[in-house]
């Protein structure tokens, strides 16, 4: 993680909103936002069903993860009628290794996927050109733009990178990252079961007969503040126990992550877009999943399983109950999100190529810092190969096939 410089960042605007005007559009740099502001509702409308790009997800992240010397960089684009036609959900930070750096809100340990730039379809070219021109003229000190977890087929981000390269001389680089995994859902449970291998299908049916059909296992779903608090504590407990058992710190070892996820869970429960479910086996919680309902897609964001009842396959109980719930509620896609755990393909999910986008301005400072980062990354990679040749990627180790 980058280290913040202790000095203040003089490139940041002091006002809550600064603007840059052209003939057909106006870019505003918004540095503060609350749910009571009109922009909050306008942003939600522009994001639509793309929950990871909306304020209910990204503003709780900002409140939990912002660091000294950083500043919110919401770049809004409005037309002549003052309608919001585009928005870049970013922040500014100064670090010793990147200089003045732009990143997407939601980055880092929160693992926000499918990041992009929001734009009305008919105004996309104008939005991207406006944002690019604003960066060039109003934030010339930027040394590094790094946008995490972009879908490879995201033409909006691809076009933005092309504009920065062709019009302003930036260097663009795609950096590989772990894929997401999506599962297409049929209209009924039996059809989905028939898509599984014969042995897995047989085991799933046996598991449901032995546990759910007999009443030994029961699905609980958070539906109000009290049950949300109950389910959230179960999530923290089971997630941490499982991760600690396999030698990992676990996401909730970070107070920031817990603060962020609790706030956004409350917001999405209020909007009807949260599904926090847990499985009780003979009255004891054994599996829990926090999912987000994004239109016809269920995003499987965070989970946990009990470590003392492997005989009951708690991971299987949790994921099959979540998939069945998604099917019965009319969802067409179950998205396991980023990570290379083998169980995802075993449930017939297909990989979705993702990448991180890096943009380097054509300045001596930016290029020098880029070379320094590359040298450090190379040294780390060589040291890792030499010192730990048998180590597997952490996300691969996190869950085995039987976990989910």
Image (cartoon, rainbow, N blue to C red):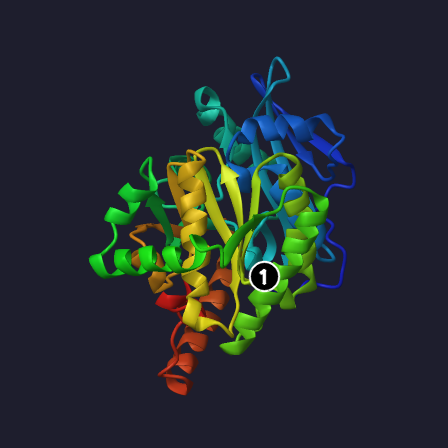
Question: Where is 250 relative to 157, above or below?
Answer: below
Q: Position of residue 331 (x, y in %)?
A: 41, 36
Q: Nearer the viewer, residue 179 or 329?
A: 329
Q: Quadrant of residue 205?
A: bottom left
* Image location (x, y in percent) of residue 82: 64, 17
Residue drawn at (31%, 38%), measured in percent from left and top? 186
Q: Residue at x 59, y 69 (%)?
A: 240
At label 1, counting other C-alpha atoms closer than 10 Å, the crowd grade (few under 14, some 14-19, many 20 or more) is few
Q: Residue 371 location, x and y as percent?
A: 46, 64
Rendered residue at 41%/47% (across/down): 323
Q: Quadrant of the C terminus?
A: bottom left
In the picture provided, is 280 more to the left or to the right than 259? left
| Outermost residue, front side | 214
Quadrant of residue 65 within the rendered picture: bottom right
Q: Residue furthest top?
A: 81
Residue 377 appears anywhere in the view: yes
The answer to which of 120 and 158 lies nearer the viewer is: 120
Name the residue tied to disc 1: 283
Residue 328 to residue 299: above or below: above
Is the residue 385 above or below the residue 45 in the image?
below
**What residue is at 51 percent from the left and 73 percent from the top?**
307
Q: Quadrant of the N terminus?
A: bottom right
Tag 1, which secondary structure? loop
Is residue 160 among the parts visible in the rendering?
Answer: no
- Could you say where residue 2 lies in the image, as x and y percent from the top left? 60, 64
| Furthest residue toward left | 198
402 up-or-down from 190: above or below: below
Viewer-proximal residue among 319 and 149? 319
Q: How many marks?
A: 1
């Amino acid at each position: 993680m980058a280290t913040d410089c202790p000095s203040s960042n003089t490139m940041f605007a002091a006002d809550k909103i600064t603007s840059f005007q052209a003939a057909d559009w106006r870019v505003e740099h918004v540095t503060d936002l609350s749910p009571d502001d009109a922009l909050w509702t306008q942003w939600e409308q522009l994001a639509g069903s793309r929950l990871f790009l909306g304020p209910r997800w990204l503003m709780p992240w900002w409140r939990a993860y912002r660091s000294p010397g950083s500043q919110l960089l919401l770049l809004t684009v409005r037309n002549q009628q003052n309608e919001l036609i585009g928005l870049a959900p970013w922040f500014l930070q100064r670090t010793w290794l990147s200089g003045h750096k732009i990143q997407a809100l939601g980055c880092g340990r929160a693992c926000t996927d499918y990041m992009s730039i929001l734009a009305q379809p008919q105004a996309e070219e104008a939005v991207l050109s406006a944002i690019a021109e604003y960066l060039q003229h109003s934030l010339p000190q930027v040394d590094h733009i790094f946008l995490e977890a972009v879908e490879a087929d995201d033409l909006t981000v691809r076009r933005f990178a092309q504009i920065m390269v062709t019009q302003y001389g930036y260097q663009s680089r795609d950096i590989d990252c772990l894929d997401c995994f999506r599962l297409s859902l049929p209209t009924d449970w039996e059809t989905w079961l028939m898509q599984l291998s014969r042995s897995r299908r047989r085991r799933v049916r046996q598991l449901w007969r032995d546990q759910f059909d007999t009443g030994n296992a029961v699905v609980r779903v958070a539906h109000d503040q009290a049950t949300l608090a109950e389910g959230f504590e179960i999530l923290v407990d089971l997630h941490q126990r499982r991760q600690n058992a396999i030698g990992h710190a676990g996401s909730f070892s970070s107070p920031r992550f817990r603060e962020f996820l609790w706030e956004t869970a409350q917001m999405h429960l209020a909007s009807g877009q949260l599904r926090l479910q847990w499985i009780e086996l003979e009255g004891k919680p054994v599996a829990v999943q926090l999912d987000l309902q994004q239109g016809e897609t269920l995003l499987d964001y965070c989970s946990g399983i009990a470590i003392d009842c492997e005989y009951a396959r708690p991971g299987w109980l949790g994921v099959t109950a979540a998939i069945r719930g998604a099917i019965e509620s009319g969802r067409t896609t179950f998205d396991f999100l980023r990570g290379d755990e083998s169980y995802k393909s075993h449930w017939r999910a297909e990989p979705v190529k993702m990448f991180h986008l890096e943009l380097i301005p054509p300045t001596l400072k930016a290029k020098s810092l880029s070379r320094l980062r590359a040298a450090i990354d190379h040294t780390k990679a060589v040291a890792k190969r030499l010192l730990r040749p048998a180590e597997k990627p952490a996300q691969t180790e996190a869950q085995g096939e039987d976990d989910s």
